[in-house]
Image (spheres, rainbow, N blue to C red):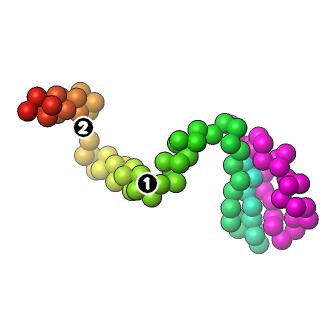
Amino acid sequence: MARIKTIELSTASGALADYTEDFRDKTVVLTLNGRAVAAVVSLQELDLDSFSLSENPEFVKIIKKAREEFAIGKQVSLAERYECRSIAEAG
């Protein structure tokens, strides 16, 4: 489970480099006047491909649409998907 540390920017006295040890094994949330404004995430246990996809606006739209369709019952089983694929490839 990820550990989280919060640093209030208005009271932070050190340079960013002073906090690098914290960045190695935990997520550091940077706040300004108590509101989260950024997060620094350790790359040690991060799947960079998944992270890249999660930051891609087009991929985020696809996932959002899929979740909305699933919520209203619009879904296809894996078996149905393979059947449709087989028919398309045969035709």
For this rendering, which residue is in front, 28 or 16?
16
Instruction: Tell me the residue that label 1 is attached to.
Output: 60
Q: Position of residue 67 (x, y in %)?
A: 37, 49
Determine the residue positioned at 16% across, 28% down.
Answer: 86
For this rendering, which residue is in front, 77 or 58?
58
Q: Residue extending furthest right?
A: 13
Up the image or down, 12 lies above or below 89; here it is below
Distance (Cα) linking label 2 and label 1? 20 Å
Q: Position of residue 61 (x, y in %)?
A: 39, 56
Residue type for callout 1: Val
For this rendering, which residue is in front, 46 or 80?
46
For this rendering, which residue is in front, 69 or 43?
43
49 vs 11, left or right, is left
Q: Toward which corner of the image does residue 6 lie, by quadrant?
A: bottom right
Packing grade of label 1 (10 A; few <14, some 14-19, many >=20) is few
Up the image or down, 81 lies above or below 13; here it is above
Q: Residue extending furthest left?
A: 91
Q: Which of the two labelled residues, at mark 2 and mark 1, occupies the earlier sequence position?
A: 1
Q: Mark 2–mark 1 contact, CB under 8 Å?
A: no
Q: Which residues are magenta?
A: 1-26
Up the image or down, 55 lies above or below 81; here it is below
Residue 64 in view here: no
Instruction: Please tell me whether residue 19 belongs to the stretch shown in magenta.
Output: yes
